[in-house]
Image (cartoon, rainbow, N blue to C red):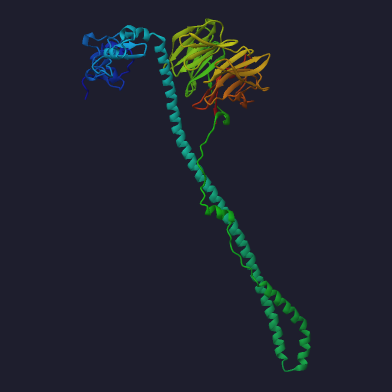
Amino acid sequence: MEVSGRKPGRSFKDTVGKSSAEDGEVFCQPCSSDGDWMVAMGYCENCNEYLCATCLKVHRRQAVSRNHKVLEGENMPKARMSSVTLNACSELCAKHTNEIVKFYCSAHDVVGCGDCMVLDHKSCKVDRIQDISMSYFNGAEHQEQQHKVDQFLHNIEQVKREIQTNDKNIQQTYIKAVNDVKSFKKEILEYLDKAEADMLAELNKRKKSDEKLISDLKEHEKTLRSKIQELHEKLQLQLNQANELFVPAKEMKERITYIGDSIKDLQQNCQFRQYEFVCSKNVKEMVASQFKLGELLVKKKNIAEMEPNFDSEIEIKVSDDTEDCFINACAVILYNRIILADSSNKCLKIVDIKNTKIAKKYKLKSVPCGLAVITKDRFAVSLPREEKIQFLTLTQSDKITESNAIKVKGRYDRIACQENKIMMLYTDHVVILNMDGKEKQTISVSNVGIVRDFALDSKSLYVSDSSYRGTSVFRFDYEGNLIATYNDTDLIHVRGLCVTRDGTVLVCDWKDDGSIHMISPECKKIKDILNHNDHVICPWCVSFCDETNRLFLCNYSFSLDPKLKNVMKIFQLK
């Protein structure tokens, strides 16, 4: 049965969709979010939301919304209002529940009703919220709050994925531990079975040896008995004849001596030595101690302990590219999305890791040089030739749209983002801006020769240098103080840098048999990875996903085989 007012399911957009416009109907937004398409009977100007009859009734009953301005019937707007409006204040005061919050005290940075201001803020300068709300809406504080909330959403999304990953790891860890216990038990049982078999084999060998000895003794005894019996019979025949007895008695004297000696030997050999099984002292003590099979120890493994294995490669050149790809920068947006700055084709490319393809290409007017991920759906690209930083938004359908841009001075190159601050890398200094483009700080890196790239963590920045003075990586704090320097004779031409969540720094060594240097936060070499690897030739930029332990690498050189230029290599660290 069809419910009155309910329409068949259809897609709903924030602005009223085509189907709605064609029908002349708009639908209840709270219901549509649950998949129910109810015709809207009213529109709340305060909430900027269409409501069906049921939701409208609830809206008017709730204390938080009963004073909202609602338009009904023909008075409803035909399309969802997207512009900012100045409506009458309707929020009820927490202290004076019958009063509406209408005022703001800037001295104490609090809002309140008229009673609050009279009682607690008589001597303060008080503004009407209606008079100042628009300037706040367009101001830096509101923007900063939005950026922070966006960052919170990005962080909580990471936490969610980590929880999901941990849940999966818990199951895998449990199964592996159970299998390890059973495997160890099997190993012990196999050892005991072998020890038992060895012991029984020794017993059988001893038994056969003893049985042969008994058999030989029996045969010897039987032979002696026959000889003794023969002597006895001869002596009995001559018992009453002295002359006849004398001769055989003398003749058998030697035989009697031999038989006597043989009996002594036989008696001696019959002294059989018994034996018994005595268990191993070590095993007996182990069993008596009621030992456990083992212990459950927390397994700690950081990136430095892992080894990279080639996972796959993704074709990054698309049909309308006019040049071979030159990926100047790359950055992980989500665990399944990475963004590439293709300088040769003047574009950005969103790579779908799961489906191993380019999900979106976004053309630019000039060459992109650096990338900075701000949140999971917002990032920035440096465009030095236009002297600006362009902010962009990524939708769930991988659509890229431009938002605001910051005009900057001079020829900078790379950019990075840290805690709602944009950092720009020049030849001898780093400039820190807020999100509105206002300069906050300058950090000198004048002791660096030719700056190639830089990367950040929460406490410091790393700058790579490749010049006539040598090849190095420098670590500075945010006051510009040099903390540490990394030099290595194996590091020939340093290019891309990346800092992982545990503080490990990955450095591209740009040469034919190039590799990735892993260095510690103290700028000490941990190890070289991917050296002399068929998939790594002239590595130019590197990025790392902490959630999946995947390393993304792009090679580049003018003389490089296009098959190596136009792919992104993926390595799994285990």
Check the picture and name the quadrant holding the C terminus.
top right
Q: Quadrant of residue 558?
A: top right
Where on the picture, by quarter, is residue 37?
Answer: top left
Q: Position of residue 102 (x, y in %)?
A: 29, 11
> Where does the image place residue 531, in percent across and percent down from the top left?
63, 25
Front-most of 225 and 529?
Answer: 529
Task: Compare residues 26 and 390 and report the one nearer the observer.
Answer: 390
Residue drawn 58% across the image and 23% down it? 506
Q: Is residue 204 above or below residue 7?
A: below
Residue lying at 76% horizontally and 87% vertically, measured from the top left: 249
Q: Quadrant of the N terminus?
A: top left
Viewer-proximal residue, 425 or 481?
481
Residue 262 image point, x, y percent = 72, 76
With 31 as the anchor, is 507 left or right in this view?
Answer: right
Can residue 327 be seen here? The reply is yes
Residue 542, visible in the rendered structure: no
How many numbered markers are drawn?
A: 0
- The answer to whether 274 is drawn above or below residue 254 in the figure is above
- Residue 440 x, y percent position in the rendering: 50, 10
Q: Residue furthest front?
A: 123
Instruction: Tell me the residue at 46%/8% (across/down).
Output: 405
